[in-house]
Image: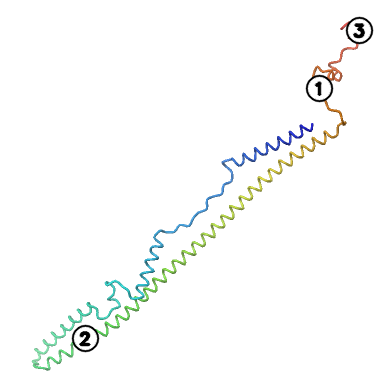
Amino acid sequence: MAWIGIGTVGGLALGATGLFMGSKGNKNKFQTPTLPTYYEDPMFQDTQKDLLKRGKDISQGDLPDYYKIIGQSGSPEFEGMLRSSNADIERASLESAAKTGQRGGAVGSNVAGAVGRNTAQLRWQDIMRSIEGKQFLFGTGIDTISGVRSAAGTNMANRNNFNLGVAGVAQQNVQLEQAEKARKAALWNSIISGGMSTAGTIAGSYAGRTPGVTPSIRTPGSAASAASNPAFRAPENFYLSGGY
């Protein structure tokens, strides 16, 4: 009977091992999901670098020739406009003098005065315009740099929030894995405990028998079976009737 108890425990252990290994090999077992990765537009870093460089160049006055006129006084375009304006004033003054019959040095003096006043006024306006243009360019450069910094801060905040979310998902995955391991461990302990309880019951039953007496298994036809089973007893008058 002791061997029966040991065999029972062994069978239960093997069965539990098969169940446990079967659950590990099951395709439907718990699987840790793949954590997502942060996606960033491939153009983001390139545009950030380009905008940062352009913002610095603009704020420092390093501009392409096409845009230099914005903050430049006495530009070739201005000089051409000034010559055209003075020529118009000179022509108008001479025509006016001819109509009024003016002659001599007075006419030349009047023309020179009108051209001088026009030149001074236009150059002053050009200087003020260039100052305003420089102020505008400097503000544009600073705003560009600030935009780059703001976009970088937003990107960093988005990345940090994403990483925090991924960390939370990873923690949940760890908790799920631990719960799954705990469930399997509890199942294993329950099976082992049940097997040990069964073995104890069998061992206790065996210990209650008379020491030194080994229970025999009776089979039909044996002497013990014939002695204990009425079906195998001979009739009382068997020998008297000449049965043998």
Q: How many marks?
A: 3
The picture places residue 101, in percent across and down from the top left corner, at 8, 92
The picture places residue 104, in percent across and down from the top left corner, at 9, 93
Q: Are marks 2 and 3 in contact (CB under 8 Å)?
A: no
Identify residue for label 2: 119
- The disc labelled 3 sits on which kind of residue? Leu
- The disc labelled 2 sits on which kind of residue? Thr
Q: In terms of sequence position, does the residue under pointer 1 or pointer 3 come before the other?
A: 1
User: Looking at the image, is mark 1 or mark 3 nearer the viewer?
Assistant: 1
Numbered disc 2: secondary structure = helix
**Does 229 sit above or below residue 15?**
above
**Does 114 sit above or below residue 61?**
below
Q: Quadrant of the C terminus?
A: top right
Q: Would you identify the image quadrant in which residue 99 lies?
A: bottom left
Judge the density around disc 2: few (<14), some (14-19), many (≥20) Cα neighbours within 10 Å: some
Identify residue for label 1: 218
The picture places residue 112, in percent across and down from the top left corner, at 16, 89
Judge the density around disc 3: few (<14), some (14-19), many (≥20) Cα neighbours within 10 Å: few
- The disc labelled 1 sits on which kind of residue? Arg
Q: In terms of sequence position, does the residue under pointer 2 or pointer 3 come before the other?
A: 2
Q: Would you identify the image quadrant in which residue 232 lies?
A: top right
Q: In terms of sequence position, does the residue under pointer 2 or pointer 1 come before the other?
A: 2
Numbered disc 1: secondary structure = loop
**Does 166 sit above or below residue 151?**
above
- Which residue occupies 64% across, 41% down? 20
Identify residue for label 3: 240
Direction from residue 164 to residue 185 in the image, left or right: right
